[in-house]
Structure formats: structure tokens, C-alpha cells
Image (cartoon, rainbow, N blue to C red):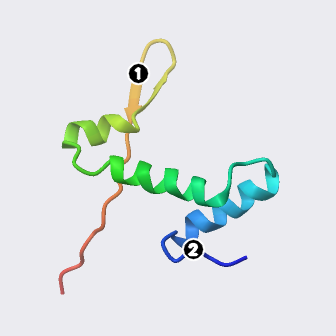
Amino acid sequence: MTMDPELPEKQEDILSILEEQFPNLPPRDDIISVLQETQLSAQGLSIEQTILKDLKELSDGEIKVAVSTVNMTLEVEM
């Protein structure tokens, strides 16, 4: 299997596992296109939209906790 140069290694690994588990998936190129479109759709969002995009809520009935993730590159100054 040849790795697509535009697909990050982690996504390549995940896609390979999915293809093993689900042999009736659409063609690989279609899946890669969807992954890339999804990644691009997050660009241009406001900070609030970015935080709300992947918001998860947990509740025990009395207390509600919201958790969100924001992926970003951290730069180290030396």
C-alpha cells in the first residue's frame, strides 16, 4: 500500500485500520477528500465557533461540565 503524500501519517494509520475492519468503505480517494474538506472547514472560524465545534458536555444531573479542544501549533522561543 502506498501512502498518499497529502495524508498525515496518523490519518493514514487510522484509514488503514478502518479499511481492514470495514472492507465495504468507499474508495480511499473519496475518504481522503472528505478528511481534507473537513479539515479545511474549520479554517476561518471565530474563536467561539472553534471552541463550540467539538464541545462535549458531561452531567451527573446536578453539575454540568463542558470540555472543548482546540488544536494548535505551539511555538517555542529560544
Question: Is residue 30 shown above or below 16?
Answer: above
Q: Residues within 10 Å of mark 2 (few under 14, many from 20)?
A: few
* Quadrant location of the N terminus in the rendered image: bottom right
Choose between 74 and 8: the one closer to the eye. Answer: 8
- Left/right placement of residue 23 relative to residue 49 reads right
- Secondary structure under badge 1? strand
Q: Residue sitting at 59 percent across and 60 percent down?
A: 29
- On the image, the x and y values in percent for residue 66 come to 38, 30
* Quadrant location of the C terminus in the rendered image: bottom left
Observer able to see residue 70: no
Q: Residue sitting at 58 percent across and 54 percent down?
A: 30
Choose between 26 and 44: the one closer to the eye. Answer: 26
Residue to which mark 2 is pinned: 4
Residue type at mark 1: give it: Lys
Question: Is residue 75 shown above or below 40?
Answer: below
- Secondary structure under badge 2? loop
Residue to which mark 1 is pinned: 64
Residue type at mark 2: give it: Asp
- On the image, the x and y values in percent for residue 51 come to 30, 40
Whole-angstrom CA distance, mark 2 to mark 1, is 42 Å
- Left/right placement of residue 51 relative to residue 67 reads left
In this rendering, the label closer to the viewer, 2 or 1? 2
Q: Residue sitting at 69 percent across and 49 percent down?
A: 26
Q: Sequence order check: which comes first, mark 2 or mark 1? A: 2
- On the image, the x and y values in percent for residue 63 come to 42, 19
